[in-house]
């Protein structure tokens, strides 16, 4: 008998896209943070914010996913990216869920598409490849 492992995810929304982040990558969830813009930064980078005395780069979740700009973000999801934290400004943090790894399937051949997660009693969400998306901002 095959046993599926369980994956815990934080579900959040940026624009019209509902996304998920593995709990292992999550550092914390904060209210929307005031940011200082960085001249010459990539379009998706909002700027830097002071989080308890440390500067954290904050990325606009909508811009990162190609969504149109909208109302101000409601929350900042701080994730681990390599050795440093990165904040993602998002519209809403919805829920913490646990699913079997059999509920996760690739959305296509392009890594930017990430995976689709079938949630019990809710529409599917996108499980993003955070390293792929953030590498495009920070390593170019």
Image: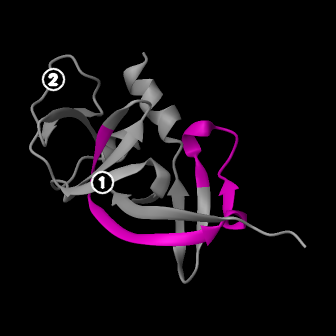
Q: Which of the pair 52/39 is nearer the observer? A: 52
Tag 2, which secondary structure?
loop
Is the stretch drawn in magenta largely helix, strand or loop?
strand
Find out whether residue 37 is within the magenta segment: no
Earlier residue among tags 1 and 2:
1
Residue found 65% across the figure and 51% down from its top: 107
Residue 98 magenta? yes
Question: In the image, what residue occupies the spot 38% across and 25% down?
Answer: 137
Residue in view at x 48 percent, y 52 percent: 24
Is the residue 49 above or below the residue 9 in the image? above
Which residue in the protein does label 2 denote? 38
Dot 1 falls on a residue whose secondary structure is strand
Picture layout, residue 69 above or below residue 3: above
Choose between 5 and 107: the one closer to the eye: 5
Q: Which residues are magenta?
A: 86-115
Q: Which residue is mark 1?
A: 28
């Amino acid at each position: 008998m095959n046993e599926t492992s369980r994956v815990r995810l934080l579900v959040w929304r940026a624009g019209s896209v509902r996304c998920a982040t593995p709990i292992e990558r999550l550092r914390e969830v904060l209210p929307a943070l005031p940011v200082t813009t960085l001249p010459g930064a990539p379009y998706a980078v909002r700027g830097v914010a002071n989080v308890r005395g440390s500067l954290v780069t904050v990325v606009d979740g909508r811009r990162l996913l190609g969504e149109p700009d909208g109302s101000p973000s409601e929350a900042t999801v701080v994730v681990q990216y390599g050795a440093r934290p990165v904040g993602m400004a998002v519209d809403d943090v919805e829920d913490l869920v646990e699913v079997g790894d059999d509920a996760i399937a690739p959305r296509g051949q392009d890594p930017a598409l990430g995976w689709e997660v079938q949630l019990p009693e809710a529409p599917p969400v996108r499980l993003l490849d955070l390293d792929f998306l953030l590498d495009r901002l920070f390593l170019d």
